[in-house]
Image (cartoon, grey):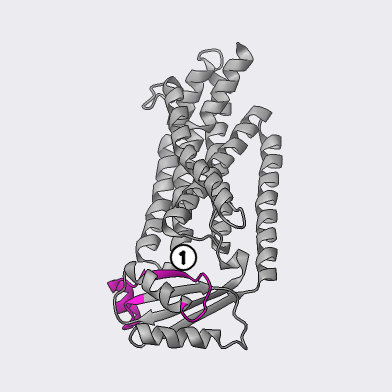
Amino acid sequence: MKNKVHVVKYRWWWMALTTLLLVPGIIAMIYSAVTYSNHAPLKVGIDYTGGTILQYGLEQKLDNSDVTKTRESLESIGVENPYIQILNVNNTQQENTKSNINSIISIRTKFIDEHSTEAEQITQQLEKTYTNPELISVSSVGPTMGKELFKNSLIAVTLAFLGIVAYLSFRFRFDYALAAILGVFHDVIFVVGIFSILGLVYNVQIDGLFITAILTVIGFSVHDTIVVFDRIRENLRYYSKKMSFGEIVDASVNQTLTRSINTSLTTLITLLALYFWGGVTTRDFVLCMILGIAIGTYSSIFFCSMLVDFWNDKRTA
C-alpha cells in the first residue's frame, strides 16, 4: 500500500499541534472562570442568566465607537451594566427585505417586566441619540427559566456522552472507545475554548443554539472517528501478519482521508454560505458548527488514530 500521508511517522508533530490548538482556549476558559461573576468558562447569554434583549433598527451606519456612546446614554437614565452590540446589515440582506435599516443595535439588560416602563424609557433615550430608532424585537427570559435551561443543557450534553460511551464500548475494543471519547473531548474543548476567547475579546455570548451546535459537533466527530477505526479493524484482519500496526494505521487513514475531507468540505461550503449571507441571529451557531466540523475531521485522522497507535506500542512493548 502506498501512503500519501505518513501520519504515524510524524505523530509527535501532530500531538504538538494538538497541544497548540487546545492550550490558548484552556487558558481563556480558566481566566473567564476566575474573572466572571458566575465563574463560567464562557460568557453566557440571556438564555442562561435571564434578562431582556431589545433590538432597534437604525437607518444610519454605526460602528463600534457608538457602543460606548450608547452605554453612557443608557447609564445616565439608570440602566445598569447594559450589554450592547452593533450589527450591520449587509447590502444583500437589505435588498432582499426591501428595508431601510442599515444597522441594528442590540441592548441586553436585566429582566424587564412587561408592566415596567423601562423599555419605553430606553426607547426614548435612544431617540435622543439616534434618528428614528425602530424597536424591531424584544425577548425576555426570567432568572428561574435561565437556570432551568442551563441545567437541561448540561443534562443533554451528559446524556449524549454516556450514550456514545455505551455504544463505542459495545462496538469496539476499550482502547478504541477511549480514544474516540478523548477525541470528542478534544473537539468540544477546542470549540468552547475559541468561544471563550471570543467572549473575552469580542463579548460573544453563548445561548441555546450553542448547545445545539455542540451536540451536533459531538455526533459528527464520533461518526468520522468510527469510519477510521472501522477501516483499521478491517485491515488488521488481512494485513496483521504482513504489516506492523503503525503501517496499518497509516494505510487505513490514507484510505479514508479523501472521504473524510470531501464530506467535511461539502458541509463547510454550506456553512460558510450561511455564515456570510445568512442572518446575524444564527451567525455564532454557524461559526460553532464550522469550527467543530473542521476540528472533528482533524482529530479523527491525526489525534484519535495516533492515540490507538500509542497504546498499541505500550501494550506490545
**Residue on which the image places disc 1:** 282
Image point (66%, 32%), residue name: 172
Quadrant housing residue 96: bottom left
Q: Is residue 227 above or below residue 60?
A: above
In the image: residue 262, left or right of residue 216: left
Q: Position of residue 150 (x, y in %)?
A: 66, 60
Question: Quick one: SS at disc 1?
Answer: helix
Number of marks: 1
Quadrant that contains the N terminus: top left
Front one among 133 and 211: 133
Query: Mark 1 is on which residue type?
Result: Thr
Q: Nearer the viewer, residue 8 or 120?
A: 120
78 w.r.t. 265: above or below: below
Residue 137 spot, x, y in % from top left = 49, 80
Residue depicted at 47% across the width and 76% down the height: 75
Q: Position of residue 49 (x, y in %)?
A: 61, 65
Judged left or right of residue 128, residue 155 is right
- Tell me the crowding category of disc 1: few under 14, some 14 to 19, or many 20 or more residues within 10 angstroms, Cα based: few
- Magenta segment includes 157: no
- Camera-side residue of 158 and 60: 60
Q: Which residues are magenta?
A: 76-103
Residue sitting at the far top: 317
Which residue sits at x=55%, y=64%? 45
The one of 202 and 11 positioned closer to us in this rendering: 202
At which x and y percent is residue 292? 49, 48
Residue 97 lies in the magenta stretch: yes
Residue 270 makes an appearance in the image: yes
Against 263, residue 80 (above or below) is below
**Image quadrant in which the C terminus is located:** top right
Q: Is residue 89 left or right of residue 21?
A: left
| In this picture, residue 99 sits left or right of residue 306 | left
